[in-house]
Image (cartoon, grey):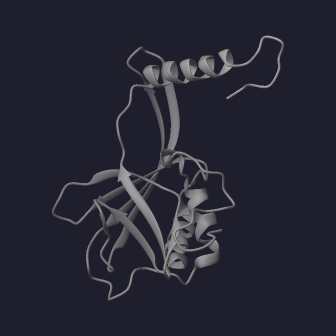
Amino acid sequence: MLSSDNRKIDSVPPMDPSDLTIGDLLVALADHKDRPLVFRYDGRPVKPGYHVTEVKAGQFSALDCEANPESWSEIFVQLWDVDEGGPVHMPAGKFAAIIRKVADHVALDQTAKLTFEVSDGMRPIELHRAAQPSLVGGTVEVELSPRPSSCKPRDRWLEEQKAASNASRCSPAGEACCS
């Protein structure tokens, strides 16, 4: 649930925005069904008449740049940033109902990576990841940021280096780390 103005969800531990799942988002919205749901990107909110035009679920298999096999599930929510729905943003409960309706027909992995596809119908679709929702005044806001590309082998190597650095700060006798 959301706690108070400009506060992040307190029932879900903080995470990297690229890790937000559709399940996390629905849990956050559950207690705020009547509040307007405002997605923000490029430093501004989506227009009040935005539409959820498509929800897609995909299973992906790939090889990374070092020929390591990769696989993941991903859910894409397409937002059409137009001003055709009236003077207020869609209520969080309506957004959740749209996702539930899709789930009646398409298997949605609640733990899948979540990506938003955003376009105003003129500009090309842009891929975004979502941050944890926040209460801002009387609205629920979800900040979207461009989804960056990455090199998975490099990312794994950096994580290994970070883990090794943290481990080297511990004493060999197994005492607590000083970090």
Horizontal side, residue 24 vs residue 102: left or right? right
Q: Is residue 178 left or right of residue 33?
A: right
Q: Residue 135 at x, y = what percent?
A: 53, 72
Residue 88: image location, x then y, percent: 38, 86
The N terminus lies in quadrant: bottom right
Q: For residue 105, which quarter of the picture?
A: bottom right
Using the image, determine if residue 40 lies above or below residue 115. below
- Give the farthest residue toward the bottom: 87
Residue, far left: 122
Residue at point 20% right, 54% down? 124
In the rendered view, tell whether residue 152 sits above or below residue 25: above
Q: Position of residue 62 (x, y in %)?
A: 43, 27
Number of labels in the image equals 0
* Relative side of 168 to 22, left or right: right
Q: Residue at x 74, y 25 (%)?
A: 177
Query: Which residue is located at x 66 percent, y 62 percent?
Result: 10
Seen from the viewer's position, the closer of residues 68 and 92 is: 92
Front-most of 110 and 17?
Answer: 17
Of the pair 149 and 79, the residue shown nearer to us: 149
Looking at the rendered image, the quarter that the C terminus falls into is top right
- Please name the residue shown 32% across and 88% down the image: 86
